[in-house]
Structures are given as structure tokens and as C-alpha cells.
Image (cartoon, grey):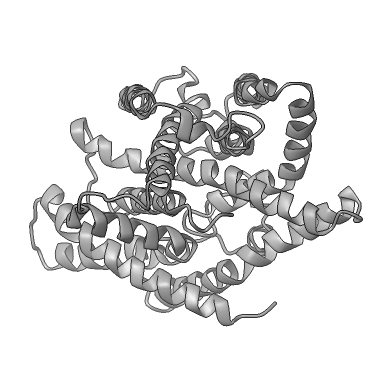
Amino acid sequence: MNNKLKSIDMLKGIGIIMIIIVHNRHFILKNTEGYRALVNYGQMGCQIFFLVSGMALCYSWFHQLEKSPAKSFSGNYISFIIRRYMRLAPGFLIMLALNFILNVILIDIFHYSPGFIMTRTPLALLTNVFFIHGFFPDYINSVFPGGWYIGTSFILYLLFPLLAALCQKLRKISPFLIYALPLIFLVINVFTLRHIAMASGGKLYPSNNSFLYYFFTNQLPCFMLGIMLYFQQQPDIHKGFAARCPLAVSVVLFALTGFISIKLYLLPEKMNYLYTIMPSLAGLAFYWLAVSMLHVELKSSEKKNTKKAPDDKVLSLLADFLAKCGRISYGMYLTHSLICWYGIKAITSALNSNGYEYNDLLFYMLTLIPSIFIVYVLGLSMELLLKKIKW
């Protein structure tokens, strides 16, 4: 992927901070009614990662095809999947082992209930080790903190070369056919999850943070938006859609779709299958955010030789920090449970056991910024460690 696109790193930085925002409140904001429920919207940071992944994988896949034109599709497919697994597995397995050790020490030895209690059965561990836990309701999110994202992502990685090939064929017929794919997959998803829910007799239902919410078909439309954005940036389609789309248009559409997704998210959850469309709606909002950010960056790069007004230092520092978080976002994702689950649970348990009373919202706000910076340091350390690991 083009490393000069700082806005893509910034998007990932926004995504990982949103995830920390929601996970840092688990043992503090027990009551999340009213405006406090906005904190939970941070879970939609995962939609940013699905969107960016769809776009980034296109660069990786088509670069691989250019390097190996003589290799068959199946050969390229196998090489692609192996590289994806090797990219994710080392850090994931390190933190999986660490979570296992922490659970054994805290639960079995000290009889203390930690922030994350993992399922430790052999089958649960094996499904996570091989990244197939996205197919298992009991193991998709009970072995690794926030592990559903890896389980769902890897299924999408398995599908990606097929999706890319489909887009290539549609592109030859008409580039605009690609734009229909996110909507088509959304319709298929709503039908599929309704059918699964009815077939299970109500045992499986796509409520928020349920197995069907995490299920790959529910995240596929957002993933397709990222693939669509890649093709929109190709010169033979729109000559760089993001740069040509008026900034005012993309900003307004981001604000509109973001507002609608937040309003729907704050509605009381009922048996209305709302969460079969919520990830896609949030993904659409972030799609327009991505278009806006790409527009600003690409237009700025066109004028790099002209005199510009001095940048706002605060905004510049914030942009740089978000980009740095984006570049180490996988390391931050892997390690953030040490703070958001284990650390915060230990602090609140200590305060409660000693009879200290505190305002939960104030305490949450006081712990959030330090948590982000500590996770940043842990994520950076993890990324440095992974660079030294050769598989």
C-alpha cells in the first residue's frame, strides 16, 4: 500500500482509539444510559479497520499478481493466505499465551476474577490458533479479548482474492457495477442472518455483540466499501475519485451518515434486526470520512511546491499521533487488553474493596488519556518485537 497516504494511517489511528474508548469503560461505566451510551459507539472503530483492510489488501494482492504473472490463481491465493496468517499469527499467539498464563495465575492460584476470563478448552484454543473461531459461536470472542475481529477478518481474507477477481470481471463490463456490490452483500446479509435466526429457533439472533453480529456476512459490506474505494481511486475509472469529489460533498455525507448511524445506535435494542445493517451504515460513514481525508491529503500534495499558511501546531501534532497509532494499530490491538481489561479491573477492584467511592464518569475520563498512551507504548513494543521474529 502507498505509504505516502498518511490519511490511511490516521484512519487506523482513529479506529484503534475508538476501540480503546469503548473497552476502557468495561469496569467503570456500568450504567451507560443516555449520553454515556455514546462511549459504546467506539466499537464501530472496527468498521474503520474492515474498510481500510479492504482497500489495503487490494494493493497487496494486485502487487503480488504483478510480481508473479506466471503463477496460477490458486498458487497466488495460497501464497496470499499464508502471508496473511504469518502477519497476524506471531503477535496473536504471544498474547494468547500471555492471557492463558494470566488466567491460570489469577484464577487457579490466587482465586481472583480477572478482567477477561478466557475459555481454555482444547477446541477453543485450537480454533483461535488457526483463526477459524469466526465459525464457532462459543469461541468467537471468549478466548482472546476482542478476538472476534481476527476471526471475522481472516474469513474475509479467505474470500478476498475471489472478491477481487469478481471486481476485475465487473470492471471489464462496467466500472460502475462494482459500486453495487456493497449493497448486494448487505441485502444478502440481512436475508442470511434472518434465516439463521429463525432456523436456530431464536438461539442465535443478531443483537449487538452477538455471534451473528460478529459473523463475517455482517461485516462483509463494510469490507467491500474499502475494495470499492480502491477501484474508485484507479485512473481508468474516476481518475482518483477522492481528489475529484468535492470536499464539501464528502464532509456533508460523512456528517449525515454518521449522525444517522449514531441515532440508530442509541435507540433501544428490540427484535428489529437493526444490527444487520448497523455495521454497514457505520462503515458508509467512515467511507465518506476516508474520501474526505484522502481528498485533503491528495490536494495538499498537488500544492506541495506552493507557499502555504503555517499549519496549526495542535492539529499537526494530533494528526501525527493518529498516524503513529495507525502504523502500530495491530500491536495496540493485541496489547490493549492488558490495560482495558486487566488493568482497569484491578484498579476498580482495589478501590471498591477499600471502600472508596468515585464518580464513574469522572473516573473514566481521568483514566482514558493515560490508557491510550500506555497502550501506545505497549503497541510500539509489540511491533518492535514482531519485527525481530522471523517465520
**Viewer-closest of 311 and 215:** 311
- The percent coordinates of residue 290 (x first, y second) are 44, 39
**Viewer-closest of 128 and 47:** 47
**Viewer-closest of 85 and 118:** 85
**Viewer-closest of 1 and 263:** 1
Q: Is residue 52 above or below residue 199?
A: below
Question: For the point 47% across and 52% down, which residue is it?
Answer: 5
Report if residue 273 is visible in the image. Answer: yes
Q: Is residue 186 left or right of residue 299?
A: right
Q: Is residue 283 left or right of residue 306?
A: right
- The percent coordinates of residue 289 (x first, y second) are 39, 36
* Count of numbered badges drawn on the protein: 0
Q: Quadrant of residue 314?
A: bottom left
Q: Is residue 33 above or below residue 158?
A: above
Instruction: Give the residue furthest to the bottom.
Output: 388
Q: Is residue 109 above or below residue 291?
A: below
- The percent coordinates of residue 206 (x first, y second) are 53, 29
Question: For the point 75% across and 62% down, which residue is it?
Answer: 82
Report if residue 104 is visible in the image. Answer: no
Q: Quadrant of residue 41?
A: top left
Question: For the point 87% across and 48% down, which residue is it?
Answer: 73
